[in-house]
Amino acid sequence: MADFTVAIPVYNGARFLEAALESIAAQDLEGVEVLVSDNASTDDTPAILERWAARLPLRVVRRAQTLPMRDHFNALLDDVDSPAYMLLCHDDYLAHPDALRLARKAMADNPDIATVYCDMLYVDEAGQQLARRSFGRSGRFNPDEIGRRCLQTGRNLFGIPLAIRTSALGNLRYDEQFLYAMDIDLSWALGAAGDAWHIDTPLIANRYSADNTTWRLLGSTVGEYRRLAAKHVGARSALQDTRLALTCHFVTAQKLAFRFYAKARNWR
């Protein structure tokens, strides 16, 4: 059995899936399984996966019908059977050939941590760098403190998990209350199982494209952050709630401006 799984949920991901698979193929894959959940794709995704079957330690689960995104992610988590894993969206990719080695080393060196995070790159549809996302930390950190700062800033200050210990995940899954903020919620909840670790090197590339689900969910930001606060912190004052709403609106405007910037680069 593998001791680490790269879990990839994909639906009609032919545009970007191969870039993700190429980035995994560049890693040290001893003890690694690549688990792809194909959410009943109707494009060339199945053919791409068939071509890659001989190049990667690949296991493909094909869903009989298309599941809603959160349900698909949870079904994929149910299929992970290794001691640790990462969930890599099909349009993202590993930005460094040592990404998995560093993630697994952090877990081996710190057996009490539940999760590993890293700095990131933002890239456009062509894979060209737009910006580097640095989190200003290195080593061990407290997930509850970061979760509370997410509420203060209206941003995901965890980042994308590079590794999650399956024992820490346990029965946790993506909560039905969240879509836009479901990564923050799960990262925060995982903190109950132990501290987190941060590697201050960009090891994951997060792609900005017209296909991103984020753009369709921006209108739900305020409501989801309010539910995050209710779930993880408890009752808040009216003033705190107003500040949270204003912060979320400001961050939404920033995200839309960054989206315009990414598009403008492609027009040149």
Image: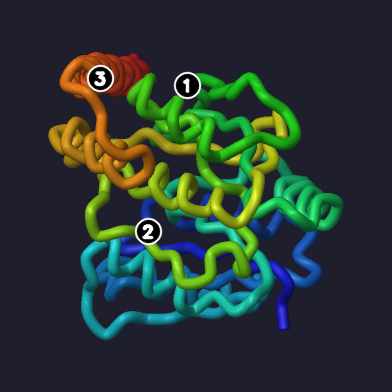
What mark, if any, has residue 130 been given in the picture? 1
| Crowd rating for badge 2 (residues with CA inside 10 Å; few <14, some 14–19, many 20+) | many
Q: Which residue is mark 3?
A: 240
Colouring style: rainbow
Q: Which residue is mark 2?
A: 14
For marks 2 and 1, the one nearer the N-term is 2
Residue 140 position in % (x across, y down): 72, 36
Report the side of 219 relative to 189 (left or right). left
Q: Amino acid at mark 3?
A: Gln
Q: Amino acid at mark 1?
A: Leu
For marks 3 and 1, the one nearer the N-term is 1
Q: CA distance from mark 3 to mark 1?
A: 33 Å
Q: Quadrant of residue 197?
A: top right
Q: CA distance from mark 2 to mark 3?
A: 44 Å
Residue lying at the far left in this picture: please name it. 219
Report the side of 52 relative to 174 (left or right). right
Q: Quadrant of residue 111?
A: bottom right
